[in-house]
Amino acid sequence: MKYPTTWLQGASLGERIACELRLQIIRGMQTPGTVLSENQIATDFGTSRSPVREAMKVLSGEGLIRLERMGAVVIGMTPGDMEELFDVRMLIEHFVVQRYVHRDNTILVTTLNQMIDKMEVALKHRDIAEFSLQDFNFHEALVLEAGHTRILHTWNGMRQLILTVMLAATEQRFASNIEESQVTIRKHRTFANALNQANAQELSRLIDEHYRDTRNAVNDSVLSSYRKTLS
């Protein structure tokens, strides 16, 4: 699967290259230790080396590659890296939902349920990209609605990484155990209902449960390719 072109509207060529390479790394197509050649990537994408350098800088900042004189060495995402990504996401969501406990969440809940509706349609049509995007949009809506500038900066720094991990995990889930995606939809709907009732205790419980299940799913899918490189 290639990175969805519909997600690249308005992106620079360097950003496009970064998105495709990021997906290749997370899916295990570019394994840890592989040296990425600027010249080869420029040839593959039919461009000069300048956009490639832009992409490499982005991926280096995300910790996916290490820049060296002879080229960029793939680091990938270790189980520890993935765990830290989930830790930060869980901390952010635990914090932002507390801001919704004593307010009217009608509009937000309506928006979230519309996203869940789109997830259901995407699942019906086996549309991996759309399901991933709407799942991501659900979580991003919670962050955006909180209106916390510093948290938003942190989220934006991880945004593309989170989205790509979700895309790779959804691809694996659709191929091997699509029933898990049905469970994901039900849990999102339960969360939206708890948010509508401003039930702080239930929201915290659901966040913990969601990230525990997501960790397990990612360990079984996305990280399997990483473990194979170590065996």
Image (spheres, helix red, strand yellow):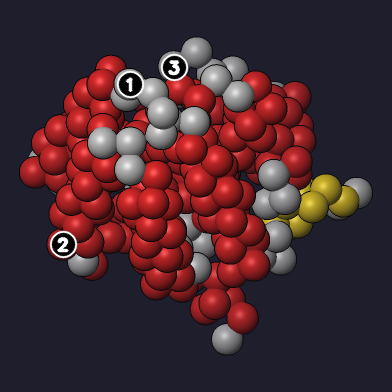
For this orientation, the residue located farthest to the front is: 102
Q: Where is residue 129 in the image (x, y as percent from the top left)?
A: 30, 38
Q: Position of residue 111 (x, y in %)?
A: 26, 23
Is 26 situated left or right of 172 in this image? right
Q: Is mark 3 on a helix, strand or loop?
A: loop
Q: Which of marks 1 and 3 is nearer the N terminus?
A: 3
Disc 1: CA contacts within 10 A as few (<14), some (14-19) or many (>=20): few
* Disc 2: which residue: 179
Which residue occupies the foreground of this view, 140 or 98? 98
Does residue 107 appear anywhere in the picture?
yes
In this rendering, the answer to whether 12 lies above or below 52 is: above
Among the 4 quarters of the image, the one containing residue 97: top left
For this orientation, the residue located farthest to the right is: 69
In this rendering, the answer to whether 161 lies above or below 169 is: above
**Mark 2 or mark 1: which is in front?**
1
Is 44 situated left or right of 48 in this image? left
Is 173 situated left or right of 78 in this image? left
Instruction: Compute the Cα span from label 1 to label 3.
Output: 34 Å
**Mark 3 or mark 2: which is in front?**
2
* Disc 3: which residue: 9
* Disc 1: which residue: 104
Amino acid type for the residue under numbered disc 3: Gln
Amino acid type for the residue under numbered disc 2: Glu
